[in-house]
Amino acid sequence: MAGIGFQLKRLYDQSSFFGQLRAYGYSSITAVGPMFLSILLITASREWLLFLDVAATEINIYMAAVQYTFIFSQLLTGGFLFTISRFVADQTFLEKEEHVLSSLYGLISLVVLIGFVMTVVFYAGSPLPFSYKLVTYLYFTQLSVIWILSMYVSALKDYKKIVKSYLLGTIVAAFFIWLLTGPLDSATPTSVFIGLNIGFFIILIRLFRDIHNYFQVNDRNYFYFLVYLEKYPLLFLIGVAYYFGLYGHNLATWFGDRAIVVGETFLMAPYYDTPVFYAYLSVLPSLVLFMVTLETTFYTTYKKYYGRILNGYPYKDIQNAKQEMYRTLGSELLFMAQVQMLITFIFLFLGVRLLPFLGMTQNQIDIYIIVVLGSWFLSLIITFFLILLYFDERRAAISLTGFYAVASFTTTLLFVLGFDMYGVGMFLSSVLGFLWGARLLIRSLNDIDYTTFCSQPIVYQEITTKTERFLRRIGSLS
């Protein structure tokens, strides 16, 4: 997201309060746009269906399908997103941007194919109507593609286009949901998904158009990016572990006594999933803060430190730049932690006041409180993880994401099956993940001189990977 970070810095550095406010507003849409808008539309459409007195079974089928498309689209694309992010960054740096557009086509085709197979297998024995299977599959596919486009779009350096695309798609989706379920009197989950599909298709098309106009050259090496799966396998594993960590505790509760089967198709635990759904909203501000503060303020000192190394500055000047970078990083982390703590208290207050009006029981509100508190630690885990990737500490990053993914799933499973306690596993794994992440980050920063000066090969030699040789052999790489 550095390209957008540079543009946001121009706004953030303005003395005008409204200029800085705009920076936070744009970064909010850019960093968490698809996720936030999905949550907003899902919540609003659910309340709209309740207002229309739609049967509870229909609403449960809608919410179950939404949850599955949301979770599994991110699990499907997560590993590819971290890999392709490195690929696009490298190609841009090497001024070989002709590889970027073709990689977008290749990645989308691969993800759509895998998603189609997953959907066919999943729905094979489902009694749900074909029309509902079709609209949910289309939504799942569009979400998967939008996650991909959102990564590519970070290179456009034009946040206004991104904001307009997301907002327009949201408004159109809301309009068609209202039109189909209200005036046209078709208040069904299928109608809601049709409205969502129309709106998100507009987002998809606009983002795709902007990317195509920016990266105009297509060299037709559609699967050259697969070489990076072999060169940087940890990046793929990091992406998978990251998203599994976010949703692992949800998946673990599906093995507990509170799990139900909706529509003879979807296994879920709404008793736990619903409060977690709202509690996770408290994590989004940390992603915004990371983009605006670390991508602007911290990046300046980060670039200064490595710039002095590359330009042969005296050792003392390099060390001064390193200490300045450390001071900036420390102050920004403290600031983010304090702001996130304030947001946590706000969410606790709002949850206790408002969630009863959404039909939640006291036990579910207790789960919400526990998960919101755990989300404060989770926000710091995400921050540590992104900083480790900033310094290309892939082994430390996979250690952190892998540890949290395993801890989130296993501790939740233990407390659910052994003690019938919900939310405690997520909270405990977040605390442990925070402690482990802090240790990894401190160790990486202490070893930064060795990593920078001693861990790199003296003479770099380009190695032809097995994947590259295979692609050339079958004619998929020129």
Image (cartoon, rainbow, N blue to C red):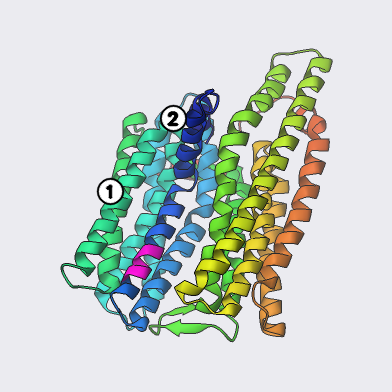
Query: How far across and how far down the image is residue 441, in percent?
Result: 76, 44
Based on the picture, tell me whether residue 46 belongs to the magenta stretch.
yes
**Residue stretch in magenta:** 43-48
Q: Quadrant of the C terminus?
A: top left
Give above or below for 218 relative to 130.
above
Nearer to the camera, 388 or 93 = 388
Query: How far across and how far down the image is residue 256, in percent?
Result: 60, 83
Nearer to the camera, 189 or 47 = 47
Q: Which residue is mark 2?
A: 157
- Cα gap from disc 1 to disc 2, whole angstroms: 20 Å
Q: Amino acid at mark 2?
A: Lys
Q: Is residue 307 visible?
A: yes
Q: Is residue 374 left or right of residue 39?
A: right
Q: Is residue 223 visible?
A: no
Give the residue drawn at x 75%, y 37%: 330
Give the residue drawn at x 45%, y 60%: 73
Q: Which residue is mark 1?
A: 202
Predominant secondary structure in magenta? helix
